Amino acid sequence: MELQARLTRILKRGFRGSKVTVERTTPGSKKLCGILVWPKFLGVEQAQRQKQLWSLLDDALTPDERLRVTVILTFTPAEAVPVEDF
């Protein structure tokens, strides 16, 4: 399975009820980036959100696969509204 689809599936399973977008950083690139919107991030500091995220990815991906993930932004639904309208 392609990493983009696998990463989406991993995030949706690890953060049940989340909205996940995973894209290539540029067309044809092997690098991926994404947005993870999850209601349970409410009241959780950004650093802790990233720690949860990367802990999941460290367990689910190989070191080479992790290197292909450049950034995944983490938001609550309320925080994501301005990003989605951009």
Image: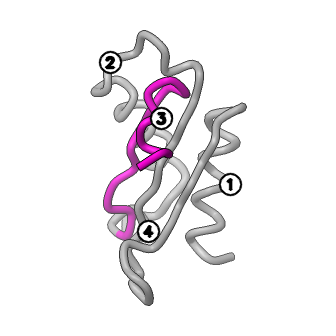
Q: Residues within 10 Å of mark 2 (few under 14, many from 20)?
A: few
Answer above or below: position of 12 versus 26.
Answer: above
Badge number at residue 45 = 2
* Relative image position of residue 9 (x, y in whole percent): 68, 54
Of mark 4 and mark 1, the one earlier in the sequence is: 1
As drawn, the label of residue 9 is 1
Q: In the displayed orientation, state which residue is furthest to the front.
A: 85
Q: Are marks 3 and 1 in contact (CB under 8 Å)?
A: no
Work out how far the residue at label 4 is from the one at label 1, CA to CA, in angstroms.
Answer: 14 Å
Segment tinted magenta in the rendering: 68-86
Horizontal and vertical percent position of residue 64: 38, 71
Amino acid type of disc 2?
A: Glu
Label 4 vs label 1, nearer the camera: 1
Instruction: Determine if the magenta segment contains residue 26.
Output: no
**Image quadrant where one finds the N terminus:** bottom right
Asked where in the image residue 14 lies, by quadrant, the reply is top right
Q: Residue at x 62, y 77 (%)?
A: 2
- Which tag is nearer the camera, tag 3 or tag 2? 3
Secondary structure at badge 1 equals helix
- Distance of mark 2 from mark 1, alpha carbons? 24 Å
Nearer the camera: disc 3 or disc 1: 3
Percent coordinates x, y for residue 20 in the rendering:
60, 48
83 is within the stretch colored magenta: yes
